[in-house]
């Protein structure tokens, strides 16, 4: 696999906004995209800290946001973020890491590679374990998490309407 995780820069602005448009057309969730769905411009999106602090107020948690870029053609195929420390909400429903792959780029192994690369970053930040959550019916995400060492802790009722199934699976990965 030839992906690398890169911080968002203006060089990728057009691709990030095309990624946003593709997810919107596909009626997808924007997991791990740091609120991209609510931003009409790249400049608004990359102002993560100010924008997300305003949105979440006392529940704000800093995150490390990366673009998953395919090396062969410098194409953005996904977005992934690492949120730390875990807030009570993230501990229950969202997890430490969220990610999305462009619909046109799915079923190519990118999610697993993105997560593998992000786990290296989490280790370098001193984390010993991370939590990943997914919809009970999201078989692709379940496989991605298991492939990267995830161990199911439990399933919880989705009281905040994040999932289609109404059930969130919570997995821990020890680093």
Image (cartoon, helix red, strand yellow):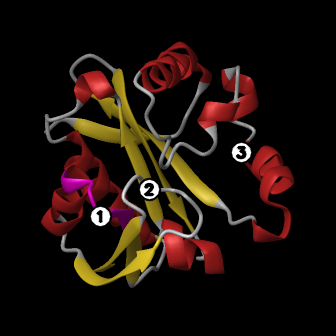
How far apart marks 1 and 3 lie (CA) works out to: 29 Å
Q: Nearer the viewer, mark 1 or mark 3?
A: 1
The reply to whether discs 1 and 2 touch (Cβ–Cβ < 8 Å) is yes
Residue 35 vs 139, above or below: the answer is: above
Determine the residue positioned at 46% across, 79% down: 126
Label 2 element class: loop
In front here: 54 or 6? 54
Q: Where is residue 156? Give x, y as percent.
A: 42, 79
Label 3 element class: helix
Determine the residue positioned at 56% across, 55% down: 64
Label 1 element class: loop
How far apart marks 1 and 2 lie (CA) works out to: 8 Å
How far apart marks 2 and 3 lie (CA) works out to: 24 Å
Quadrant of the snapshot with the N terminus: top left
Label placed on residue 48? 3
Q: Earlier in the sequence, mark 2 or mark 3?
A: 3
Q: Earlier in the sequence, mark 1 or mark 3?
A: 3
Extent of the magenta region: 133-139
Determine the residue positioned at 70% across, 28% down: 39
Q: Which residue is mark 2?
A: 163
Quadrant of the snapshot with the C terminus: bottom left
Left or right of 64? Residue 58 is: right
Q: Which residue is mark 1?
A: 136
Among the 4 quarters of the image, the one containing residue 148: bottom left
Q: Where is residue 9? Give x, y as percent.
A: 58, 28
* Residue 123 visible at all: no
Is 138 included in the stretch rendered in magenta? Answer: yes
């Amino acid at each position: 696999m030839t992906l690398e995780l890169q911080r968002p820069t203006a060089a990728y602005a057009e691709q990030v906004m095309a990624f946003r448009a593709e997810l919107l057309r596909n009626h997808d969730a924007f997991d791990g995209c740091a609120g991209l769905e609510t931003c009409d411009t790249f400049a608004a999106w990359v102002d993560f800290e100010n924008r997300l602090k305003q949105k979440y107020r006392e529940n704000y948690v800093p995150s490390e946001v990366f673009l998953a870029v395919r090396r062969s053609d410098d194409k953005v195929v996904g977005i992934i973020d690492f949120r730390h420390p875990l807030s009570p909400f993230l501990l229950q429903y969202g997890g430490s890491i969220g990610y999305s792959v462009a619909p046109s780029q799915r079923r190519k192994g990118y999610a697993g590679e993105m997560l593998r690369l992000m786990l290296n970053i989490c280790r370098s930040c001193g984390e010993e374990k991370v939590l990943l959550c997914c919809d009970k019916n999201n078989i692709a995400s379940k496989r991605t998490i298991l492939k990267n060492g995830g161990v199911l802790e439990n399933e919880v009722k989705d009281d905040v309407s994040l999932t289609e199934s109404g059930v969130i699976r919570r997995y821990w990965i020890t680093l």
